[in-house]
Image (spheres, helix red, strand yellow):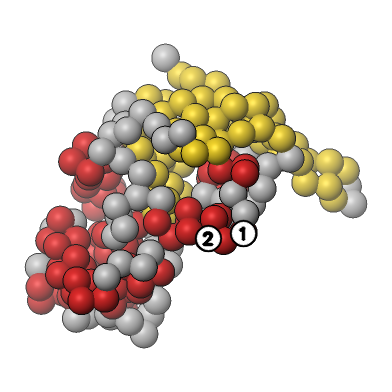
Amino acid sequence: MLKVENLDKTFRTAAGDVHAVQNVSFEAKDGEVVAILGASGSGKSTLLSLLGLLDAPDRGSIDIDGTQLAILDSAGRTRYRSSQVGFVFQQFNLIPNLNARENIKLALEFAHWPKDSRDQRANELLAMVGLDESKADRRPSKLSGGEQQRVAIARAFAAQPHLILADEPTGSLDKATGQKIVDLLREIASTQNATVLVVTHDEKIAKQADRRFEIEDGALKEIA
């Protein structure tokens, strides 16, 4: 379970303070898909960065399965990012000179997955996201946008993380392909018992989540 309490983040600029995240508190259960709606500049990407320990909050706490992330040292934060959280991005962020299988194996290496089982795990993940073996040896440039996002999702789930952070995961895809990606995230959240947070500006995507929140000027509220 993810539990966030009183999270604040302020950026100080020449033009003045920007309160990107303001007193945010919420919980998300294992196996649950949570959507966070918000316009550009509303604070949703900053919130994901805080949850993924890509940035540190000014105040507040983030707890995952009883572990307080604020008390982790640098090494602990690195281990958390590589083994307990997976990231899915709008632009896929695959390494272009590695094929699909190698992109996943690299994530497994970072998570210190046993070397002799990385190929098997990568193949299992590719099958899980619906990519056949003929696509495993293709580099990202030889895959469609939907196929690249499937590889990115497989990579995010590589180390069996408890939390998946998806930042506009359908933004670069056509409507039909985007729907398939949403269906895939929902299915994997359920079967892998992971919490999936999807940041989006698309209300149709958000309505398919188990719970919905809206963020505006850094403040978060749940949508009934």
Figure disc tally: 2
- For the N terminus, which image quadrant? top left
Question: In the rendering, which numbered label is found on residue 74?
Answer: 1
Q: Tag 2: Cα neighbours inside 10 Å, few (<14), some, or many (≥20)?
A: some
Q: Are marks 1 and 2 in contact (CB under 8 Å)?
A: yes
- Image check: 73 left or right of 165? right
> Which kind of residue does numbered mark 2 sit on?
Thr
Q: Secondary structure at mark 1?
A: helix
Query: Are there few (<14), some (14-19), or many (20+) residues within 10 Å of tag 1?
Result: few
Residue 136, x across and y down, in percent? 18, 75
Q: Position of residue 211 (x, y in %)?
A: 37, 25
Residue 74 visible here: yes
The correct choice, above or below, for 142 with respect to 104 in the image is: below
| Disc 2 target residue | 78
Q: Residue at x 40, y 56 (%)?
A: 83
Eyeballing the image, is 153 above or below 30?
A: below
113 displayed left or right of 67: left
Task: State the SS at label 2.
Answer: helix
User: In the picture shown, does residue 83 fall above or below 135?
Assistant: above
